[in-house]
Image (tube, rainbow, N blue to C red):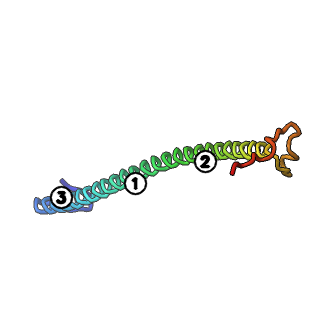
Amino acid sequence: WVVRGFAPATFEDLEQDLEETRAELDEALEQVALLQAAVRVRDERAAAAQGLVDGLRADVDRLRREREEARQTAHEAARLAELAEARAEQAAAAAAASEGRGGGDDAETGPPSRTHVCAGPPAAQEP
């Protein structure tokens, strides 16, 4: 076959073109293999990163639950402390009132009750 401006190709020329094309194809296939390997590495890293992200999200969720439980526990402890303080105040008031009925003049409870009955003088001891 004849192409204008070119000499007819010989078998050797065609064979050499074929070898060059094969070499180019082999080089392109090597590049494809390298790119595929790079994509696999990227995918593996992306999967590992996604695993880390999922693990961190699970940790965040767990920590949020624990924080909420701690908040509720602290709220309950504060409520119980207030209750204990109120009971302690009631007990102190009851003790002060009881002490006041015993005859002492106390600033908190006031003078002894007028209805308080004394047992009288101490009994005489026998010799």
Instruction: Please indicate whether residue 127 sits to the left or right of residue 109 in the image.
Output: left
Graded by Cα atoms within 10 Å as few (under 14), some (14 to 19) or many (20 or more), the crowding at tag 3 reads few
Residue 126, relative to residue 16: is it above or below? Answer: above
How much space separates mark 2 and mark 1, taking CA atoms? 36 Å
Residue at the front extreme of this rendering: 127
| Residue 17, label in figure | none
Q: Which residue, given by chain and number where applicable, does mark 2 sit on?
A: 74
Disc 1 residue type (three-letter): Ala
Q: CA distance from mark 3 to mark 1?
A: 40 Å
Q: How packed is label 2: few (under 14 Cα within 10 Å), some, or many (20 or more)?
A: few
Q: Nearer the viewer, residue 103 or 10?
A: 103
Label 3 residue SS: helix
Nearer the observer, 53 or 30? 53
Q: Circle 3 is placed at which residue position?
A: 22
Do the residues bearing badges 3 and 1 touch, measured as CB atoms within 8 Å? no
Viewed as shown, does residue 32 lie left or right of 112? left
Could you tell me the amino acid type at mark 2? Answer: Ala
Which of discs 3 and 1 lies nearer the camera? The answer is 1
Look at the numbered disc 1 and give the secondary structure of its residue. helix
Regarding mark 2 in the picture, which secondary structure is present there? helix
Residue sitting nearer the eye, 111 or 59: 111
Residue 92, image x, y percentages: 73, 47
Question: How packed is label 1: few (under 14 Cα within 10 Å), some, or many (20 or more)?
Answer: few
Is residue 61 depicted above or below 30 in this figure? above
Left of 11 or right of it: where is 109? right
Residue tagged 1: 49
| Residue beneath the point at 26% across and 62% down | 5
| Type of amino acid under label 3 | Arg
Report whether 120 appears left or right of 69.
right
